[in-house]
Amino acid sequence: MIAITGATGHLGLATINALLPKVAPTEIVAVVRDPQKAASTLPQGLTVRTGDYNDPASLLAAFQGVETVVLISSSELENDARIREHRNVIDAAKQAGVRHLIYTSIVNPSPESAFNASPSHFSTEEYLRASGLAYTVFRNTLYLDIIPMLVGEGKLPSSKLYSSAGDGKVSYGLRAEMGEALANVLTSEGHENQVYDIAPGPAYSFQDLAATLSEVTGQPVEYVSVSGEEIAAGMRQHQVPEPFVNLLLGMHQAMKNGEFAMPSTTFEQLLGRKPMDLKTYLTSVYGK
Ligand SMILES: NC(=O)c1ccc[n+]([C@@H]2O[C@H](COP(=O)([O-])OP(=O)(O)OC[C@H]3O[C@@H](n4cnc5c(N)ncnc54)[C@H](OP(=O)(O)O)[C@@H]3O)[C@@H](O)[C@H]2O)c1
């Protein structure tokens, strides 16, 4: 059996949907912390078990009879808490006799990263490598799917894009395709003790985003490069909670530093086709 944690989240569900044509639903264990959300979110026929990253006993029970676990990284914002949660999952998998654990990390994980989530990914990877479990690490880049959050939700983006990322570039990837790549790895051989950069080329700057948005909407969109302080002040004006201000500020700084610009062909190889590019994605969201 294959267990997917975070099954009621976007990437977990995308992985399950991509697995369903290949694996009997009863062989897929959807590990969820909220059974009510599971009832309204998950496809029929899966084996659904409750497992909270903060409750080791629930994880141990959820992993019984499971051969491979996909640990979808936690949405907890505080680093030490995230690390603790991820370690709980790895420990429970080991205790339950799981053989292989696939972890969704970040490109370029580093304790020195400007991106607040990166140190917890670095630490989790280290812990996983030392665990004795067979492992596969998906170092996922930023999702294409977060671009609407960066450029403005709604049918048309704003005519001005503000960022403190300077000319920094990002290799964006579609979340649903990351789920597909995970499903492909789960149903094929040769992925044990591998680390994959899930970050397609080319990488794009905010200038590129503005130019592509202008092209697909037919309306001029201009990039305005601002300081981190200005971005933070803008978010606070819109009542963005402080932990998110810090997360987003760090993300823009990491973009500026080139931390997410890691073009690699691995994603294409695991998908078996070219990953979705920026223009196709923006056209699907904002196209006329
Ligand atoms: N690369 C990127 O651009 C990017 C962007 C955002 C996030 N991320 C990271 O990638 C992960 C997956 O992305 P996503 O889009 O699928 O995020 P998501 O939709 O927020 O899913 C996160 C999942 O983790 C589950 N979860 C959180 N805390 C948990 C806990 N204590 N115990 C059990 N389950 C817990 C959530 O459960 P519920 O469904 O009950 O909430 C949810 O299913 C995120 O959690 C985050 O670490 C990456």
Image (cartoon, grey):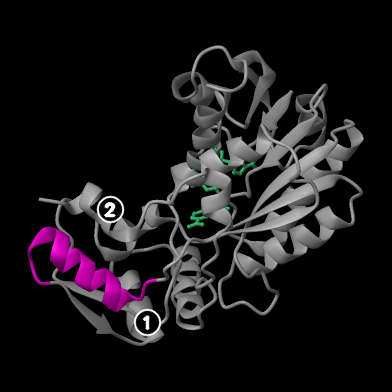
Residue sitting at x 72%, y 66%: 122
Above or below, 59 against 190 in this view is: above
Residue sitting at x 18%, y 61%: 157
- Is 281 within the magenta? no
Dot 1: what SS?
loop
Residue sitting at x 71%, y 28%: 2
Left or right of 207 on screen, residue 198: right
Whole-angstrom CA distance, mark 2 to mark 1, is 25 Å
Closest to the observer, 264 or 231: 264
Above or below, 206 against 277 in this view is: below
Span shown in magenta: 204-220
Closest to the observer, 79 or 271: 271
Instruction: Report which quarter residue 146 is drawn in.
Output: bottom left
Asked whether residue 6 is in view, the answer is: no
Closest to the observer, 119 or 280: 280
Instruction: Report which quarter residue 78 is drawn in.
Output: bottom right
Residue sitting at x 65%, y 40%: 185
- For badge 2, the amino acid type reads Thr
Give how far across and how far down residue 203 sits, in percent: 42, 71
Tell me whether circle 2 and circle 1 mark residues in contact (CB < 8 Å): no
Image depth: mark 2 or mark 1 in front: 2
Give how far across and how far down residue 102 sits, in percent: 71, 44
Label 1 Cα neighbours within 10 Å, binned few <14 / some 14-19 / many ≥20? many
- Is 216 within the magenta? yes
| Residue beneath disc 2 | 280
Give how far across and how far down residue 191 sits, in percent: 74, 46
- For badge 1, the amino acid type reads Ser
| Residue beneath disc 1 | 164
Label 2 Cα neighbours within 10 Å, binned few <14 / some 14-19 / many ≥20? few
Prevalent SS, magenta region: helix
